[in-house]
Amino acid sequence: MDTYYHPKDLGHFADMGKGNPALWEKFMAYYGAVFAEGALTEREKALIALAVAHTVQCPYCIDAYTQASLQKGSNLEEMTEAVHVACAIRGGASLVHGVQMRNVAGKISM
Amino acid sequence: MPLLIRSLNKRGSPLASGKEQVRLLEAPNGFPRFDETIAVAGLHPLTGTLITVFQINVGKLCNQTCRHCHVDAGPDREESMSRETAEMCLAALARTQIPTVDITGGAPELNPSFRRLVEGSRRLGRRVIDRCNLSVLLIPSQAGLPAFLAAHEVEIIASLPSFSAAQTDAQRGEGVFEKSIEALRLLNSLGYGREGSGLTLNLITNPVGAFIPPSQKSQEAHFKSRLAREHGVVFNSLYTITNMPISRFLEFLLESGNYEAYMHRLVTAFNPEAAAGVMCRYTLSVGWDGRLYDCDFNQMLDLPMDHGAPNHIRDFDPDRLHRRRIVTGNHCYGCAAGAGSSCGGTIA
């Protein structure tokens, strides 16, 4: 194995069902239901998934949901904005913890 | 400098030949042949039903050179239907009750017989569709064309791949989006696309890349919202169409290394319901030179009607066209993938 990640491995995702088919089937049924058209459109859900994929930094998910977003009718402008949403929340999450830093520093400082 | 795209034909590309495209498409690629797949679905041999669309491709001349064009059309193409052939089309039409005449190209409006075909077909009481690239309506020599189309209540099916200028221009050429919006506003000002006007304006979107189209219903809502909000443009319906793996789109697939993955995508998305409703079953496709085909894609692959059906408009015989056996190949996966694809959008 020369690398942990290989693009072809995405196509072998279903192999995870071999260890425990019952859990795999439950997961896939849930997964399919989550991404079906509902109060949110399939296109909107693919954009959310794309943003989350960047947050969890999963290359398989980024590959899959870049393609899914295009196929569901989003364009590069919308997809870029989705990634910025992920970026803003990640950055904001760091920054808002600065309040804790300020609390601790305030408590022990003169 | 904008990228100057010339037709495959002008560049002398091997892909300008329908025969070469068919050779590539039919070469063993590790997936079942289309005929094998439809046999499993109980649809082989694919046969025609009652013809309801008389589609006339008046030629390859176009003012645009879109990167995905299955016709390999452009300003450098000269093939154009003669007045004599146009008259043969009208005479053939008069012998039938085919309700819809669908005029395409190239930019069909640039053909000298375009208005004659519209007037003649309308006089016969037929619904007429103009497959319009929008920018042609702004060409000075075409002044009066929008009013002509409105006066004859011609249904316009206009190509607009995206509400994004970047995506549209990437497929159709620099500056095309802006011109398309200007033309859509012009059509709206004549009543096209507006409720109760009786003037139908439908849009067609092809994916700008190697993927199959989204859900037509959700994409229509998205287009309507964005075009109205950002450009004040309205339209009636949106049709999503799959890019066929032929001609300039085939060139893109091969050059970008996407050919095998795209074919795999089409094959794995095969939908028997879509295959049963493919447009070739109810369409007669006439080429600029009068030859007859089962569809516009077969026309571009130089695959005329076969299996005993007449293959020139001068030999037109409606009785021999119904229930004809349709010429198929691996490119047909494009019409049968996912929700299916036709000149009227999705099928299933």
Image: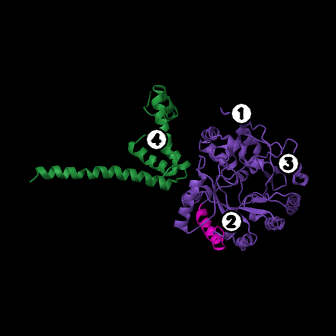
The answer, for residue B103, to whether it is visible in the render is: yes
Q: Looking at numbered disc 2 in the image, what kind of residue is underneath it?
A: Thr
Q: Is B210 left or right of B18, judged from the image as shown?
A: left
- In the drawing, what numbered circle is on residue A61? 4
Q: Earlier in the sequence, mark 1 or mark 2?
A: 1
Highlighted magenta segment, given as a residue range? B174-193
Q: Marks 4/2: CA distance? A: 41 Å
Residue A79 at x, y percent in the picture? 47, 52
Please state the chain letter of the residue tagged with numbered disc 1 in the rendered image: B
Instruction: Say which of B39 and B115 sits in front.
Output: B39
Q: Nearer the viewer, mark 3 or mark 4?
A: 3
* Residue on which disc 1 sits: B40
Q: Marks 3/1: CA distance? A: 25 Å
Q: Marks 3/4: CA distance? A: 49 Å
Q: Marks 2/3: CA distance? A: 30 Å
Disc 1 and disc 2 on one polypeptide chain: yes
Secondary structure state at the residue bearing disc 1 = helix
Up/down of A12 relative to A82, above or below: above
Q: Looking at numbered disc 1 in the image, what kind of residue is underneath it?
A: Val
Disc 4 and disc 2 on one polypeptide chain: no
* Residue on which disc 3 sits: B321
